[in-house]
Amino acid sequence: MNEQTQNAVFAYLIDEIAACQRRQKELLADNRDDEAKFEKIRTNVFDIFKTVLSVAIRTVKSGSSAEIKDFFLQKTEQIPANWKIAYAKAAEHGDVEKMHYESIKLEAIAEIRETFETIWGDK
Amino acid sequence: MTEAEAIRLFKCLSDKSRLQILKSLAIEDMYVERLAERLGLTAPTISFHLKKLADAGAVTSYKKQYYTMYSLCRDCFNTSLLDIIQEESDDAQIQSQRDAEYRQKVVNAFFEYGKLKIIPAQRKKKRIVLEVIVQSFEFGKIYTEREVNIIIADYHDDFCTLRRDMIVEQLLARNKDGYWRI
């Protein structure tokens, strides 16, 4: 059951990465380079959290589902902390470009967290 | 239109979404949400593109009631391509343009929102950074060391190093009365 859940989260992250990469390609082909860059940013976020999940599974020796969940959710708070600071700083200076880059990352992490919690549940 | 302005504009226009925004604005002035709905993009994405277009001088904005309206900067597009390629640029102008671009690149790399991120190791870059900081000092005014430190500390915590560097680079001078800008 635990492995099934893990695989479901991995599958979600892998699907999202593939979807972002597909959209990135389409946007590049459509001469929308900046929007392609936005997709690249999203890809990186999903990729980071795919790695985080692998690390969580390897690090938690007991294999306890609850501990893996705690580890993963803790990282979803820790890693974006600097993104939030960067967003606030950019907003303070009216830096629309930077704000947009940071908000893409923050939206992606919010999606990941929500989906992770849905799939992992309270097991 | 200068060569640099033309390059910036062309770079900005080489994006389908931005061209579509301009096409919409050619019909009438619009606000962000209206453009987003019309072009099937998110409002933040539209704002992102509008910022780039505004920086390139292709659009301008104005307030209308609760909205910020964007309009096409028609003067910019009335310039013909022939005018742009026939624009003469002498060597001195090209050189000074290159210098200005290099300078801007250094400033962008080392400053973030007016704060110096790190003190450059390379002398040429450090000189540029110090020239930016020295602009906070008025000509003809004598500053105490404390005042100098406070001004520099607005940019970076290591005000001692920067203060000494400004003396070495002859951007500031000092005697027993204090410091002044050269």
Image: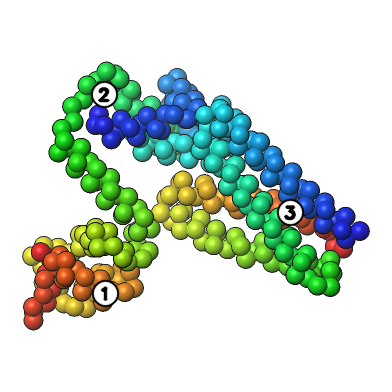
Which residue in the protein does label 2 denote? B84
- For the question of whether residue A46 can be seen, the reply is yes
Q: Residue A16: percent from the left, percent from the top?
A: 71, 44
Q: Residue A46: percent from the left, percent from the top?
A: 67, 51
Quarter of the image where one finds residue B148 = bottom left
The residue at the point 20 percent across, 74 percent down is: B164
Q: Amino acid at mark 2?
A: Ile
- SS at mark 3 in the image: helix
Select label 1 or label 3 by which is in front: 1
Which residue in the protein does label 1 denote? B161
The residue at the point 87 percent across, 58 percent down is: A3
Q: Residue A9: percent from the left, percent from the top?
A: 79, 53
Work out how far the residue at label 1 is from the one at label 3, CA to CA, in angstroms. Answer: 48 Å
Q: Residues within 10 Å of mark 2 (few under 14, many from 20)?
A: some
Lower position in the chain sequence, tag 1 or tag 2? 2
Residue furthest bottom as drawn: B176
Which residue in the protein does label 3 denote? A114
Tell me which chain the residue with mark 2 is part of.
B
Q: Residue A100: percent from the left, percent from the top?
A: 52, 46
Residue furthest right as drawn: A1
Q: Residues within 10 Å of mark 1 (few under 14, many from 20)?
A: few
